[in-house]
Amino acid sequence: MRRPVDLQFTFAALVIALFVVAGALGGVLAPHDPTHQDLAQTLKPPAWHAEGSLTHLLGTSALGQDVLSGLMAGARVSLLVALCAVGLSGLFGVLVGLVAGYLGGWIDTLLMRLADIQVSIPFILLAIALIGALGPSLANVIFVIAITNWVAYAKLVRTETARLRQRDFVRFAQVSGTPWPAIFARHLLPNVMNSIVVLVTLDIGKVIVFESALSFLGLGVQPPTPSWGTMLADGRKYINIAYWTSLFPGIAIFIVVLCVNYAGNWLRVRSDPKAGP
């Protein structure tokens, strides 16, 4: 029987697609150079205001930078950080989870205790310490988020792997002398991949928030590279006279994260019919 179309998921998917297009092609599609400063156009309101102009649909910042172009360039930064950080943390976490769940014993205990130590350290404190030592930059933001985000993958894959290693097809592979890297690749990883994909989808929204928070605190992407968090931080100084400088970056973060989380939850429910909404 054909399932009815989920309009909410369709809307979320369209928003995510627009986010990806803006991130990938923002430099081409943006109406202005997002780093260009025009002091003659400072704090111009959006086009629907009487003082607004179609030249700057969402207004300009305190430095005369086009807000819409900044949002599109910020999408590129958020997309890059999300893909790289989630990819690195996912690869490391999945490897740790496979090793811990398959080998068990003292190796499992050691790796899981390391994971517990990692979880016990607040993200912001660790980020401040590491970026203070390494210096704020796009690469360091990706590195910090990656090394603080691997535990969820490790614990998920470890639990699934510990269950799967008792199955007959894994035991048969062990008895037949199949090396453990081949068992990982052929028998364990394909059976946990569905859960990993769901976790990756849910994780992207969290990483976007992390990157925006670090940039808002001045610990992330540095000017002149546009970032939603940096735009929020700069715009809060003018919130009473130019609401658009911080409102639109905040709305962008809210909508994208909400849609990504909804898509991840939709995948979770579809992959496990017994899961709650």
Image (cartoon, rainbow, N blue to C red):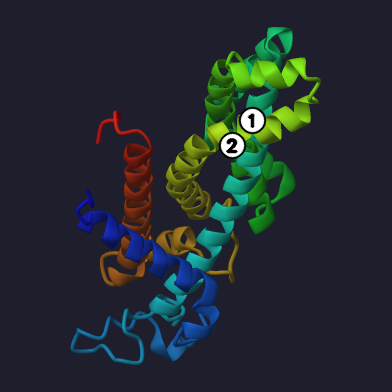
**Residue 33 x %, y %:** 52, 84
Q: Residue 235 carries which label?
A: none
* Alpha carbon distance from label 1 to label 2: 6 Å
Q: Are marks 1 and 2 in contact (CB under 8 Å)?
A: yes
The residue indicated by pointer 2 is 190
Classify 75 as above or below 106.
below
Tell me, yes or no, if residue 274 can be seen here.
yes
Q: Residue 187 carries which label?
A: 1
Q: Foreground residue, 170 or 114?
A: 170
State the image quarter where residue 52 is shown. bottom left
Tell me, yes or no, if residue 149 can be seen here.
no
- Dot 1 falls on a residue whose secondary structure is helix
**In the rendered structure, which amino acid carries the disc numbered 1?**
His
**In the rendered structure, which amino acid carries the disc numbered 2?**
Pro
User: Which quadrant: the C terminus?
Assistant: top left
Classify 20 as above or below 30.
above
**Residue 119 x %, y %:** 55, 24
Relative horizontal placement of residue 216, taking residue 188 as reference (left or right) = left
Classify 200 as above or below 23.
above
Badge 2 crowding class, 10 Å Cα cut-off, few under 14, some 14 to 19, many 20 or more, is few
Relative horizontal placement of residue 139, taking residue 28 as reference (left or right) = right
Badge 1 crowding class, 10 Å Cα cut-off, few under 14, some 14 to 19, many 20 or more, is some
- Dot 2 falls on a residue whose secondary structure is helix
Going 52% across and 49% down the picture, which residue do you hit? Answer: 214
Q: Foreground residue, 125 or 195?
A: 195
